[in-house]
Image: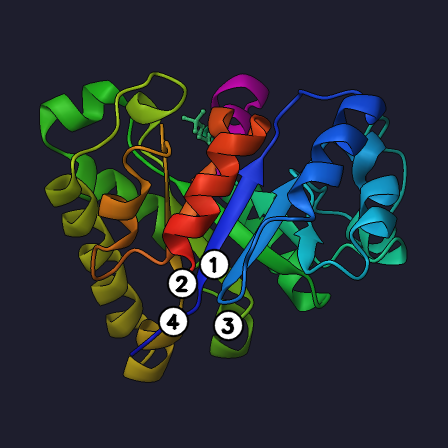
C-alpha cells in the first residue's frame, strides 16, 4: 500500500520569533507536491507561524501538550488551547520529554488518549537507549513503550496517531541507525499494529524514523519498505538541509 510520506521538523527549543519567520519565508518555496510537510516550533511561535503558513501547505504542530483540559497546571498548555489557534497535531513521547522531564509511559498514554479523544492528531515517539540496544533487549523495550502508550487505544483513535521510531542513541549524535536496523524495527512495529488492530490499520498507519536524518542519508532511509518519512531535529533548522530531506520524501 502506498502511504503519503511525512517530513516533520522538530525545532525543539531553538529559534526566536524573528529566526522562525526568516526560515519560514524560505520554507514556503519548497516544492512538496506529494509529501506532508510539518514543522514543530516552540509554543510562543505556534500562532504567528500558523498564520504565516495558512495557505502554503506546511502544517504547524506542537512539541508537547498536557493531559488535562484545564486548571492549576502552571506552565502547561492544553489541547483546547492548541486547537483554538488552529493547531491540530502534537508530538508526544519524545525521548527528551521522557528523559529530561520525567514523562512515563503511563503519562504519555494519558496525553495520547486525551489528545486523540479530543480530535487532535498525534506523532507518538519511542525508541531504545544505547545500553538497551547493546543488551539486545530493544524489541521488548519498544513493544512496552507501544503497548502502554498507544496499543490500548480503540481503533477509531489509533487512526489519529502517526508513530515515530527514534533510537535515543541516534538523536543529535550524527550516528544514524543503518537501513537494516531501521527496517527491522519498522516491520516489527507494523506487525504489532496488525496483531492488535487489523490489516487495514497496519497498512495505513505511518511510521516515521528520527535520529540524525540528513540530506545525505534521507533517500536511502525513506526508500525502506516500512518507513513513511522522518522526524528531523538538527537538519530541520537549516533551510538547504531540510529542503533536500523534503525532496527525498516527495516521490
Ligand atoms: P536529530 O535529527 O537532531 O538527530 O534529532 C532527531 C529528533 O529528536 C527529532 O525529534
Which residue is at a point 63% across and 43% down the rendered structure image? Answer: 39
Residue under label 2:
206
Q: Say whether marks 2 and 4 touch (CB < 8 Å).
A: yes
- In the image, which residues are magenta? 96-105
Q: At which x and y percent is residue 32?
A: 54, 58
Q: Earlier in the sequence, mark 4 or mark 1?
A: 4
Q: Of discs 4 and 3, which sits in the foreground? A: 4
Residue identified by numbered label 1: 162
Q: Could you tell me how far apart the alpha carbons at marks 4 and 1 are, in whole angstroms?
A: 12 Å
Q: Disc 1 to disc 2, how far (Cα)? A: 5 Å
Distance CA(mark 4)–CA(mark 3):
13 Å
At x 48%, y 67%, the residue is: 34
Q: Earlier in the sequence, mark 1 or mark 2?
A: 1
**Which quadrant does ligand 1 occupy?**
top left
The reply to whether dot 1 and dot 2 touch (C-beta < 8 Å) is yes
Name the image quarter holding residue 204: bottom left
Return the mark for residue 181. Answer: none
Quadrant occupied by the C terminus: bottom left
Q: Residue at x 72, y 59 (%)?
A: 88
Locate residue 20: give its quadrant.
top right
Q: Label 4 belongs to which residue?
A: 3
Report if the CB atoms under discs 4 and 3 are less than 8 Å apart.
no
Please identify, in this view, whether the residue under mark 2 or under mark 4 is nearer the observer.
Answer: 4
What's the colour scheme?
A: rainbow
Residue on which disc 3 sits: 159
Amino acid at each position: 500500500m502506498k502511504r503519503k510520506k511525512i517530513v516533520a521538523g522538530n525545532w525543539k527549543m531553538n529559534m526566536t520569533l524573528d529566526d522562525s519567520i526568516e526560515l519560514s519565508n524560505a520554507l514556503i518555496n519548497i516544492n512538496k507536491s506529494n509529501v506532508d510537510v510539518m514543522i514543530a516550533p516552540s509554543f510562543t511561535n505556534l500562532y504567528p507561524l500558523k498564520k504565516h503558513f495558512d495557505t502554503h501547505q506546511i502544517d504547524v504542530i506542537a512539541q508537547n501538550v498536557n493531559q488535562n483540559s484545564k486548571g492549576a497546571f502552571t506552565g502547561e498548555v492544553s489541547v483546547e488551547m492548541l486547537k483554538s489557534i488552529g493547531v491540530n497535531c502534537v508530538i508526544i513521547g519524545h525521548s527528551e520529554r521522557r528523559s529530561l522531564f520525567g514523562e512515563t509511559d503511563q503519562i504519555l498514554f494519558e496525553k495520547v488518549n486525551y489528545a486523540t479523544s479530543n480530535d487532535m492528531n498525534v506523532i507518538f515517539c519511542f525508541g531504545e537507549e544505547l545500553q538497551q540496544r547493546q543488551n539486545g533487549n530493544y524489541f521488548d523495550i519498544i513493544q512496552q513503550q507501544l503497548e502502554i502508550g498507544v496499543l490500548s487505544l480503540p481503533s477509531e483513535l489509533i487512526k489519529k496517531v502517526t508513530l515515530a521510531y527514534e533510537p535515543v542513541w541516534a538523536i543529535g549524535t550524527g550516528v544514524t541507525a543503518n537501513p537494516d536496523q531501521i527496517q527491522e524495527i519498522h516491520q516489527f512495529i507494523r506487525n504489532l499494529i496488525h496483531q492488535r488492530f487489523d490489516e487495514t490499520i497496519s497498512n495505513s498507519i505511518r511510521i516515521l524514523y528520527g535520529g540524525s536524518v540528513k540530506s545525505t542519508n534521507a533517500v536511502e532511509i525513506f526508500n525502506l519498505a516500512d518507513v513513511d518519512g522522518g522526524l528531523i531535529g538538527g537538519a530541520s533548522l537549516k533551510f538547504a538541509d531540510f529542503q533536500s530531506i523534503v525532496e527525498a520524501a516527495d516521490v
